[in-house]
Amino acid sequence: MDLLPLNDPRWLELDHRNWFQGKRSSWVPEAPFVPDELSKLRDNPADLGRFNDLWPWVCSEGTAWAAAYAVVPYAVEFAERLAPERRFDYCPRHAKSEGWRDLRFRGDFLASRRYP
């Protein structure tokens, strides 16, 4: 799977909840810049709390925001770096949301991946 580089300026164009037209909304200043969060997860993929905190920003309220489609390949990469019994943990706690189904990224996808 190809990853959109974390320093790619196109991340600014990928909206998510409370991130529009390249910036966070003024009414929710804590909205994350997704590449910053992914960078931290790349350093520590076992930080599932960080991933679970990030996911509702990119896939929430029945909406898979544009940024979600760029996050999924990273989630797969991070899951692959965990012990086999922990890989399914990267299926977010919101796995039953419409957005997650829209992304067609479920445990069966992770389970079908080949792991070294």
Image (cartoon, grey):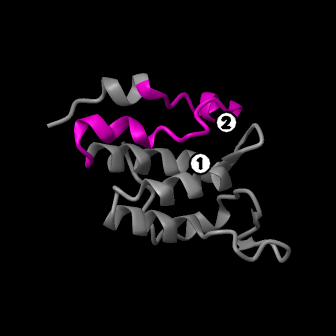
Element type at mark 1: helix
Which of the marked residues, 1 or 2, is nearer the chain's N terminus?
Answer: 1
Query: Where residue 11 appears, x then y in whole percent?
Result: 58, 64
Q: Residue at x 43, y 53 (%)?
A: 48
Residue 31: quadrant of the picture: bottom right
Query: Where residue 98 appears, x then y in whole percent?
Result: 70, 31
- Few, some or many C-alpha atoms within 10 Å of disc 2 (few <14, some 14-19, many ≥20)? many
Q: To which residue does mark 1 refer?
A: 68
Residue 62: quadrant of the picture: top right
Mark 2 residue type: Gly
Q: Report the span colored magenta.
A: 81-107
Query: Where residue 79 appears, x then y in whole percent?
Result: 34, 44
Element type at mark 2: helix
Mark 1 residue type: Ala
Q: Do callouts 1 and 2 mark residues in contact (Cβ within 8 Å)? A: yes
> Which image quarter holds the N terminus?
top left
User: Position of 8 compared to 102: left or right?
Assistant: left
Q: To which residue does mark 2 refer?
A: 99
User: Position of 31 compared to 86: left or right?
Assistant: right
Front in this rendered view, residue 56 or 85: 85
Q: Check residue 43 for magenta coloring.
A: no
Residue 97 versus residue 34 in the image, above or below: above
